[in-house]
Image: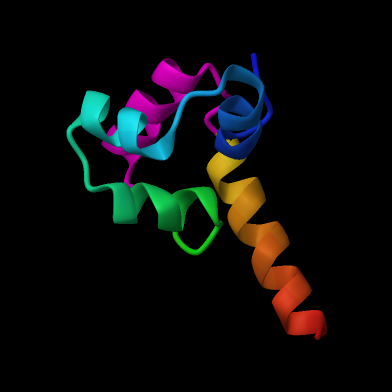
């Protein structure tokens, strides 16, 4: 299991484009999720978590961490 999507991509060599293709979503949408700009809706979160072997709560952790850093700046 990986802690988040970014780590999954780094450790496995999978790409955002491939993940998006496999899950039939736009790569740009996945990019915003990976960057912590948005949290996916529950159905997509479940699919991503299953495919990437990551905890379901990783999406909110990444999002909150990003936004807490932005608020502190």
Query: Is residue 39 at least partly visible in the picture?
Result: no
Residue drawn at 33 percent across, 37 percent down:
17
Q: Which image quarter: residue 13?
A: top right
Query: Is residue 43 at least partly visible in the picture?
Result: yes
Is 45 located above or below residue 32 in the figure? Answer: above
- Magenta span: 40-56
Q: Position of residue 26 (x, y in %)?
A: 22, 48
Q: Is 42 inside the magenta-drawn segment? A: yes
Q: Position of residue 15 (x, y in %)?
A: 44, 32
Q: How many marks?
A: 0
Residue drawn at 56 percent across, 30 percent down:
9
Q: What secondary structure characterizes most of the magenta part?
A: helix
> Which residue appears farthest toward the bottom when viewing the image?
73
Q: Is 41 inside the magenta-drawn segment? A: yes
Is 39 located above or below residue 47 in the figure? Answer: below
> Which residue appears farthest toward the right when viewing the image?
72
Residue drawn at 50 percent across, 64 percent down:
37
Q: Closer to the camera, 48 or 10?
A: 10
Quadrant position of the C terminus in the picture: bottom right
């Amino acid at each position: 299991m990986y802690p988040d999507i970014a780590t999954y991509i780094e450790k496995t060599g999978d790409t955002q484009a491939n993940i998006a293709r496999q899950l039939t979503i736009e790569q740009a949408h996945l990019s915003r999720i990976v960057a912590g700009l948005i949290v996916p809706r529950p159905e997509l979160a479940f699919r991503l978590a299953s495919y990437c072997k990551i905890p379901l709560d990783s999406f909110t952790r990444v999002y909150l961490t990003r936004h807490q850093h932005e608020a502190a700046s």
